[in-house]
DNA sequence: AACCTGGATTGAAACGCTACAACTCATCCC
DNA sequence: GGGATGAGTTGTAGCGTTTCAATCCAGGTT
């Protein structure tokens, strides 16, 4: 039951271990006949190279850390799948880590990955800063960030173009003839809130609408419940707008619940557009028009960037911005 | 920039490498003063044990394969998180693998995990059979299945008690005074369809209702679209029942869409209950009552079982059945 | 016939750690 | 005082690869 080692293969094939190693790593240097002989031995014995030994010898493993806030976040789930797909095809292995946005957990995971001599990490940084980046660098870990930051030219990152997304959503609503639109955003300190709203404003400007044609409702969190409240606030306003763009699908779904409950019809009385296009968007009572983000592509791209950094010495750090697209459904 | 090795620590602390190794693995055998001296050296040098070397030496790694159909399946996402949480606390590492129910991919992942000398796998088997189990066993991989099978007493497994869940849902509806209930199930060859429906029948029997008090509508897949169709079928029937239990939330959401679109009110005209309690259930236009399955606990339990099998030589294989519970919302 | 050339093969030293047998040296007991 | 005890420590042989300098040898040149 003991695993077959390279030595047994060598013996069986009547060559040295070095030759077997060459067969594994640089088959082209072997004479064709030798190559066949070794292949035969490998097959017959069912030889499986020991990853740990390899790693010990060449100083690094094949693992890549996927360090996320929480895989259960549907967006991150997609990212995880995309990253895994890509890495699998290039012979890498994905180590899943959930930080819960806890810097301590994050740190422990990074230490662990370091011990494993991982090739790098794809990470949603819990607290991004110059210091953080430098510290991780100092550990000797390569990384690709899931974060929209122009501020770190020395790090690869991938992100969604939130401004473009917001603009799409608003443009869509304006094109449908809505005079005024209400934009429900999350906490002002979050990049997403700001950018998606900015896109909304840009759309209004581009359409030649006055600055005040978009009302802003800011809520404290990107949750269903906050969405419901926002919906109530909108309905309660003296002259509610006929279109609302929410910076996130959960908010939009919440708004829709309030609106429906109040007996108003969607989209006839009020049109709603969300952002993220989570599964719930399509399955909602009135299917929700939403800005779709291809999380799979994002994860895959991040993986690609990391692999490039690992393999290409002349690698230039880059930031990839993904343009989302609008998925029109019944809510608008 | 080269990593610190155990030798350097030993030298710094003025002890042998064996002592440092003992410090790492069996600190209790060291004299307290020695222990402190080594700890000091470790800290100062920032020593990080090389996982690969360890693994090479003791013959197995710390990785555990998490081999799933697709992490994007919301249920499996929860499982993944649960497993990761548990394994992390016991110092194991999770290697994510998505098979897409493809036996070939599955096989390749298992080979890979074998090369990594993984401690075992938590797996949703693409095709479960005696042969499959034996083959994996032969590879020398320990495993825990996410599968409801009484047929393999020599394998650990975890699963949801679908019968109990179906019963809960139906009992709930009957208790609300509905005379007849329609049960929308998926393909008859799927265990879930059968068991959940069985639970439904059991509830009816227990409530003293006649056999024919539950109508069965079977559809070809667990999808939103099939749910819509089922909804239409139900509405078209001469005397539609006032309550419907769907073997899955997507079906339920589809049914709700059809019902709403036809101008009927939920739950007043028709009550609906789903199964799985996916996120969309809570965010639906009319929040959906659903049978909740604690996927996190399931994943965590599976991980626990595997760890037990690895650590305890006298381990007895077990099957864990998780009872779901009903989450009552507005749809019923 | 002596000498080159270069493709093919190989021996053996790392890589960093664990485990075990062997050793040291106070302490205790008769 | 001699010996036994046992807690604490250590030397070193693997673990399975990779890599590189060294070797081998068939064929071509002069």
Image (cartoon, coloured by chain):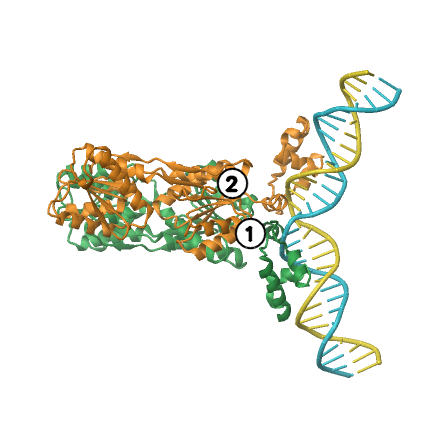
Chain colours: A green, B orange, C yellow, D cyan
Residue B117 or A215: which is nearer the viewer? B117
Q: Which residue was labeled with disc 2?
A: B92
Apparent side of residue B282 relative to residue C10 in the rendered image (left or right):
left
Specify whether residue A247 is in view.
no
> In the picture shown, does residue D3 fall above or below B91?
above
Observer-side mark, 2 or 1, equals 1
Task: Say if mark 2 contacts mark 1, CB within 8 Å.
Answer: no
Which image quarter holds the C terminus of chain B?
Answer: top left
Q: Residue at x 21, y 46 (%)?
A: B216
In x, y percent, where is residue A327?
A: 25, 54
Residue that numbered label 1 is attached to: B115
**Mark 2 or mark 1: whose residue is earlier in sequence:** 2
Residue B175 rendering spot, x and y as whole percentages: 20, 32
Few, some or many C-alpha atoms within 10 Å of disc 2 (few <14, some 14-19, many ≥20)?
Answer: many
Q: Would residue B55 be seen by someone viewing this image from the given angle?
A: yes
Chain of the residue displaying label 1: B
Q: Secondary structure at mark 2?
A: loop
Left or right of A23? Residue B93 is left
Q: Residue A189 is drawn in which quadrant?
A: top left
Residue density around tag 1, few if under 14, some if 14–19, many if 20 or more, within 10 Å: some
Question: On the picture, is B329 further left or further right than A39?
Answer: left
Mark 2–mark 1 distance (CA, rounded to whole Å): 17 Å
Task: Tell me what residue is drawn at x 45 percent, y 53 percent.
Answer: B106
């Amino acid at each position: 039951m003991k695993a077959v080692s390279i030595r047994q293969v060598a013996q069986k094939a009547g060559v040295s271990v070095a030759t077997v190693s060459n067969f594994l790593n640089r088959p082209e240097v072997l004479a064709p006949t030798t190559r066949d002989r070794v292949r035969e031995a490998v097959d017959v014995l069912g030889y499986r190279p020991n990853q740990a030994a390899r790693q010990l010898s060449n100083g690094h493993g094949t693992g890549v850390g996927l360090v996320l806030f929480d895989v259960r976040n549907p967006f991150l789930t997609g990212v995880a799948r995309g990253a895994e797909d890509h890495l699998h095809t290039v012979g890498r292995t994905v180590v899943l880590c959930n930080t819960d946005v806890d810097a301590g957990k994050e740190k422990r995971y990074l230490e662990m990955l370091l011990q494993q001599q991982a090739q790098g990490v794809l990470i949603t940084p819990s607290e991004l800063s110059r210091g953080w980046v430098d510290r991780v660098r100092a550990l000797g870990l390569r990384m690709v960030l899931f974060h929209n930051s122009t501020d770190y030219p020395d790090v690869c990152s991938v992100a969604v173009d939130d401004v473009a997304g917001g603009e799409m959503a608003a443009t869509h609503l304006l094109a449908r003839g809505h005079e005024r639109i209400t934009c429900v955003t999350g906490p002002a300190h979050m990049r997403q809130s700001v950018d998606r709203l900015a896109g909304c404003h840009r759309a209004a400007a581009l359409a030649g609408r006055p600055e005040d044609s978009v009302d802003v409702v800011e809520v404290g969190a990107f949750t269903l419940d906050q969405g419901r409240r926002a919906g109530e606030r909108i309905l309660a306003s003296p002259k509610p707008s006929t279109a609302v763009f929410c910076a996130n699908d959960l908010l939009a779904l919440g708004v829709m619940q309030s609106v429906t409950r109040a007996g108003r019809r969607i989209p006839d009385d009020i049109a709603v557009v969300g952002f993220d296009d989570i599964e719930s968007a399509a399955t909602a009572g009135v299917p929700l028009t939403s800005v779709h983000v291809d999380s799979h592509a994002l994860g895959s791209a991040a993986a690609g960037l990391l692999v490039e950094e690992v393999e290409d010495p002349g690698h230039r750090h880059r930031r990839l911005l993904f343009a989302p697209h609008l998925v029109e459904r019944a809510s608008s």
